[in-house]
Amino acid sequence: MESGLDEKTPARNASEEVRSVGFEDGEDREGEVESCVTLNDKRRATLAEIDNAKFSWFHVRICIVAGVGFFTDSYDIFAINIASVMLGYVYGHEQKLTSNQDLGVKVATPVGTVVGQLLFGWLADVYGRKPIYGYELMLMIVASFGQALAGQAHGVNIIGVLVVWRFVMGVGIGGDYPLSSVIPAEFASTRIRGRMLTAVGANQGWGQLTAALVAFIITSAYKDSILADDPHVLPHVDFIWRLLIGLGCVPGAIALYFRLTIPETPRFTMDVERNVRRAAQDVDRVIHSPAAGVDVGLKVYERDDEGAVVQRVRAPKATRRDFRRFFSRRENLVPLLGMCYSWFAIDVAFYGLGLNTSIILQAIGFGSPSADVTGTLAVYTNLKNISVGNMILAVAGLIPGAWTTFLVIDFWGRKPVQLLGFVMLTILYIVMGFAYHDLTATSAGRKAFVFLYCLTNFFSNFGPNSTVSVFPGESFPTRYRSTAFGIAAASGKVGAVVSQVGFGKLVNIGGENAFVPHLLEIFAFFMLTGALSTMVLKEGKQVTLEEMSNEQQEGFIQGRAYSEVESKPEIEEL
């Protein structure tokens, strides 16, 4: 492992000034320089404090602050599923978006997400979790406003403007994935780490439900206005989709302050900033402090006294050469590839259906207005039914599936949950695909199809959609954890892009929505291969992050690299 006397790690804050303290060969500054053995002992003790910490309000706060990001991500991503129908009524040809327009507004966000996951994952390993956390939320807030205020003109098409803004929003959403998973993982105690990560990810179901609920409330509030509209213009539907998309910035704006004031993880401070002393102090302040259970979000403290010696230790450091060396080893590369493919496979189906729920519901005729309902009443009825259909799918499948995973993940394990999910999804998609025409031929059959659809959502979240973010969040060394997470997550969103492009180009082969059953059969194939990729993953149940890193921990700190004297102590909010 490459390490050594590298250039000095920059101070955490711009106002934190340091100067080097030199030591002559053989000179001993008693009380200022700790031995290599002592530093390793202190690192082990600090990690043990984190791994064995009792569940506290601080852990709850971390889950809430990180979970709001996943809530906002899901709201912003899946609101377009309903908003695209509204856009069709207002701006589409014959009140419907073309296949390319529909594809553009839906695929732009996953494409941006790929960029954000790779970029922010790398940045969080280079500059730290804390300095980066919050900027991704700012991008999402600005992009939501941009979409809500987008306009049409002779020189610009509103669909094109929305595609650009949704790409920008996707970059912010992508940045949230590695940060909102790695931070809880690095703060969590070993016995509850799986539940903390699952609780954070479970907010996706609530976000999807809220998007459908908000659409239903706004549509109902505008009922009289819609019914009074010119059926060829529908100006009040234009109001509805703007409110639906624009409200997505509200939870992000609320959470922004708490993200900007969240502390750096002690693991990053020790292993990347290489400041063992400060990490030990941070653990005492944020986990063991009496205030940690009451007002840790508002507490302020001083980092170090002026003139205190800050020791940077010699430890493995992230470099291109070290990265290639670490991931060239089979025991590190194979699990990463397994995580990448598992995430790719589940996102092919999850986003392939999730972003096209309105199309699926319309294709099977579930909740569609009857033929004798026409004009603006048909518009209102269709929008209301699509919103209700999305709420049913979230309440009956996504939310209970995620919280079922929460209950068992630290007892049963990650691999069994993911394997069960993939196997059940394989069976469900086979049944839905090959029996599609029989199921959708009658009213009772359509209800059975919707029930099976709810089961796919349940086993997505009581399965791989919950666990694919747990594996990379608790694997690999601290210096590469966020980067590797970004790579795995980006692989998933490549799957989302592939499924969106495939769905958009294939769904109407042979007639309108005629290819839907074959798409379900294709999804079954990906679920089966996802089950196979799960077999190469390492179980993280009740195992510390350091054990999961596949890196030798004995003698991790190889000596003192240099020391600094700190001045201008920084007051930092937690």
Image (cartoon, rainbow, N blue to C red):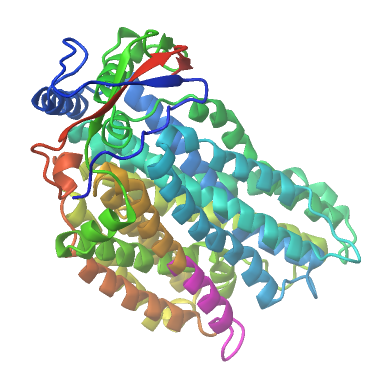
Is 494 left, or right, of 551 in this rendering?
A: right
Q: Is residue 429 above or below residue 269?
A: below
Q: Position of residue 67 (x, y in %)?
A: 44, 37
Number of marks in the rendered image: 0
Q: Quadrant of the C terminus?
A: top left
Please state which of residues 24 and 300 is positioned toward the viewer in this rendering.
Answer: 24
Is 318 left, or right, of 80 in this rendering?
A: left
Q: Report if residue 568 lies within the magenta region.
A: no
Q: Report if residue 509 lies within the magenta region.
A: yes
Is 121 left, or right, of 41 in this rendering?
A: right
- The dominant secondary structure in magenta is helix
Q: Residue furthest bottom?
A: 510
Q: Position of residue 275 (x, y in %)?
A: 29, 26
Is 5 left, or right, of 206 in this rendering?
A: left
Q: Is residue 19 visible?
A: yes
Please state which of residues 215 and 303 is positioned toward the viewer in this rendering.
Answer: 303
Q: Quadrant of residue 320?
A: bottom left
Q: Position of residue 540 (x, y in %)?
A: 17, 47
Q: Which residues are magenta?
A: 495-513
Residue name at image x 29 percent, y 51 percent: 472
Residue name at image x 27 percent, y 74 percent: 529
Please state which of residues 322 and 486 is positioned toward the viewer in this rendering.
Answer: 322
Q: Quadrant of residue 23?
A: top left
Q: Is residue 378 visible?
A: no
Q: Position of residue 396 (x, y in %)?
A: 41, 52
Residue name at image x 36 percent, y 47 percent: 482
Q: Is residue 511 above or below residue 346?
A: below
Residue name at image x 59 percent, y 84 percent: 508
